[in-house]
Structures are given as structure tokens and as C-alpha cells.
Amino acid sequence: MASHRAAKADAIPSELRTRDRWVRHSATKVPLTTAGTAASSTDPRTWTSYREAAASTAGVGVGFVLDGDGVACLDLDHALNTDGTPKPWAADILRRAGATYVEVSRSGSGLHVFGYAEVRQGRRIRREGGYCVEAYGAGRFIAVTGRRFRGAPSTLGDIGALTAALTA
């Protein structure tokens, strides 16, 4: 178990792990403090270090808070086929994202594309053909799994141009 946890931690970029913007979360993705009380995606007093969040047993997992400092996440719901391959629309986004950290979401069918981009207000940026892409950069937390997708790097890349193109 400890080695499994360490492998997941190693997958998570240090650009995220070294920021004290971590929370725990419930099974229904409600942010929690390490003590299990309500946390807030806008109140830094309820956040902690990655190490403390990972060591806590409150809730079911860890989450990273986006606070508007240029770290953003594209949330791709239902992006994977049952065999784990990306659907064509998701494959296009992954190609355009380039070398940046991508992980499989808690559901096992979605992807989180983390990187650097200015996204001040979270929004659903496209919903066509039954898929949904959302962009977040502030005031939200993302349930982080550490399940790196297909050899994606454990570093953050620049996804600003992709995010701008998707929101245009």
C-alpha cells in the first residue's frame, strides 16, 4: 500500500505537490479539511500541504485547489472508451495540449489535463456530440487521483493556447 501511494505521489507534478493548496474530499466530491470538516475552495485557511492531505484518512481522496495563480485544469468528462483509449475528440485535445500532466479521473472514464493557463472563471467551454470539457483556474478544487494517463509527463506544460482556442 505504501509503495502504491508513493507511486501515485511521484506521478503528481511537484508544481502541484509543493503548493499548500490541498484538501481531502468526500465520495460526492465535497472538499474536506484533513480533520474531516468542511473545507472551501476559496478559503486558504482550510487548505494544507500535499503531505498532510495525503496522510489524512478523512474522506476518500485528495484534491488540489486552483486559486488563480496560472495553474489550470481542463476536465474532460467521459473522454475514454471502455478499453481506456481516448475518444476522438479527447485525443484531439490531448494532442493539442502537448507535454503536460494528464491523469485519469475518479470515474475512470474522464481525464484531467493540468497545465499553465489563465482561466479566471471556470466554465463549460464546449458541449457538442455528447461530450463536455470544462476549464478551471480559480475557486475550484480538482479531485486528484495520481493515475497518470499513458506516460504523460509529471510536469506542467503551457496549455494557454489550447484553453484560449477552446473558449474562443
Image (cartoon, rainbow, N blue to C red):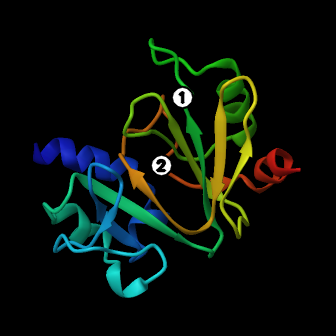
Nearest the eye: 1 or 128: 128
In this figure, which residue is indicated by the disc labeled 1?
A: 78
Q: Nearer the viewer, mark 1 or mark 2?
A: 1
Nearest the eye: 117 or 119: 119
Q: Is residue 43 above or below residue 54?
A: below
Decide: few, some or many residues near mark 1? Use Cα within 10 Å; few <14, some 14-19, many ≥20: many
Left or right: 68 with respect to 128? left
The quarter of the displayed image where residue 22 is located: bottom left
Q: Is residue 152 visible?
A: no
Decide: few, some or many residues near mark 2? Use Cα within 10 Å; few <14, some 14-19, many ≥20: many
Q: Is residue 134 above or below residue 71?
A: above
Instruction: Evaluate if marks 1 and 2 touch, with contact meaning CB atoms under 8 Å apart.
Output: no
What amino acid is found at the position of numbered circle 1 in the picture? His
Percent of width and height locating residue 1? 10, 42
Residue shown at 12% from the left, 48% from the top: 2
In this figure, which residue is indicated by the disc labeled 2?
A: 154
Cα gap from disc 1 to disc 2, whole angstroms: 23 Å
Q: Is residue 54 visible?
A: yes
